[in-house]
Image (cartoon, rainbow, N blue to C red):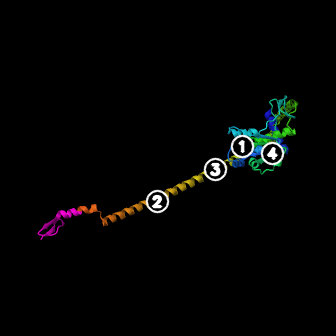
Amino acid sequence: MRRLELVALDEEMRIRGAQPAGSAVVIVMIDDASVAAVGRWPIPRRKLADAIGLLSAAGATTIGIDLLFAERESVGNDQASADQESGGDAALAELGGAIDIGPLRVPTDSATRMLVNYRGPPPAFPTYGFAQVLAGTVDPKVFRDRLVLIGSNALGARDTFVSPFTAVMPGVERLATVVDSMLRGNHLRRPGAMPWYESVAMLVIALALALAVSRLSLAVAALSFVYNWISNNRVDHKKEVRELKAEFDKRITGLHSTHRTEMQTLRSTSYNNFTRAVSQAQENNAAISRLELKLEQRLALHPTREERRPFRRAQHRDCRFRGGDHRFHGLGLPRR
């Protein structure tokens, strides 16, 4: 029954349309551009502390952080963040279907749940980039006497919720909607006599179904009309999911393309260096071959003493001195 009630409530909000949000809440969003400007995720605590300091100096009355600090940092960074955080003195007291937060009373059900009065598709509140706040490009007047919420909508670090107007509402946007409802007091309240209304409605529905069974054709036509009406007025959540998936695939493809280009450049550079080294080695081998050839030619024209010594010994051994004449038998000369 509750599920049916929530579906009907979503349809009522779509029929009602978007409503302007209050001016008391401002969002500082950590988007993809902010992560790229800072250079890493998660955002360093020192950067968050600097942003909180700038917002406090600008006159923000309250600063809320909708982030998950899952990793520890150095002691200095943690202490800097702790020094900037201000502890609130609001006491929560559950009073049977309502919670008192200071002078504010928030209606809830028996499980301490509250219905969210969505304003419209995001962004329904003034939203500024985290990097713009750090750079000082945002006019400080927009934060004066405002409640500022810091949240994330970066790729891979966002938390999203389904609303009657969109399937991917950032978590900090939903939190801003709840805070705006608390401050303005325009909650979605469930009347105390609602159980009686529901009983009467169930009885009427049962009678209507009994009548519809007797007239099946009329019932089919009515159901077809209701189905077509709901189909024409509901938000195409699958289309938004497909668009987000296409954006993610596009970014992944860009990263792969950049990596492939870098690898091709590195491969081309390595091949050119190897080619130059081979050419240099071939030139060195050719130079060495030319030097060896010149050395061999020089040795052939000018033999060394060791190379001439065996030839001289052969001459002395074959020489004959006879009657004052010498004969060179070893050289094959005729005798006299």
Is residue 248 at all visible to an observer of this figure?
yes
**Disc 1 residue crowd, few under 14, some 14–19, many 20+, Cα 10 Å:** some
Magenta stretch in the rendered image: 311-336
Report the quarter where the N terminus lies: top right
Confirm whether the magenta stretch covers residue 326.
yes
Q: Residue at x 20, y 62 (%)?
A: 314
Residue designated by label 1: 46
Residue designated by label 2: 280
Q: Amino acid at mark 3?
A: Leu
Q: Nearer the viewer, mark 3 or mark 4?
A: 4
Q: Nearer the viewer, mark 4 or mark 2?
A: 4
Q: Is residue 320 above or below residue 35?
A: below
**Disc 3 residue crowd, few under 14, some 14–19, many 20+, Cα 10 Å:** few
N-term mark: 4 or 2: 4
Image spot of residue 108 (x, y percent): 83, 32
N-term mark: 1 or 4: 1
N-term mark: 2 or 1: 1
Disc 2 on helix, strand or loop? helix
Gap between marks 2 and 3 measured at Cα: 38 Å
Side of 274 relative to 315 (left or right): right
Closer to the camera in the image, 19 or 200: 19
Disc 1 on helix, strand or loop? helix
Residue designated by label 3: 255
Gap between marks 3 and 4 measured at Cα: 39 Å
Disc 3 on helix, strand or loop? helix
Image spot of residue 87 (x, y percent): 79, 36
Gap between marks 3 and 1 measured at Cα: 29 Å
Q: Amino acid at mark 4?
A: Ala
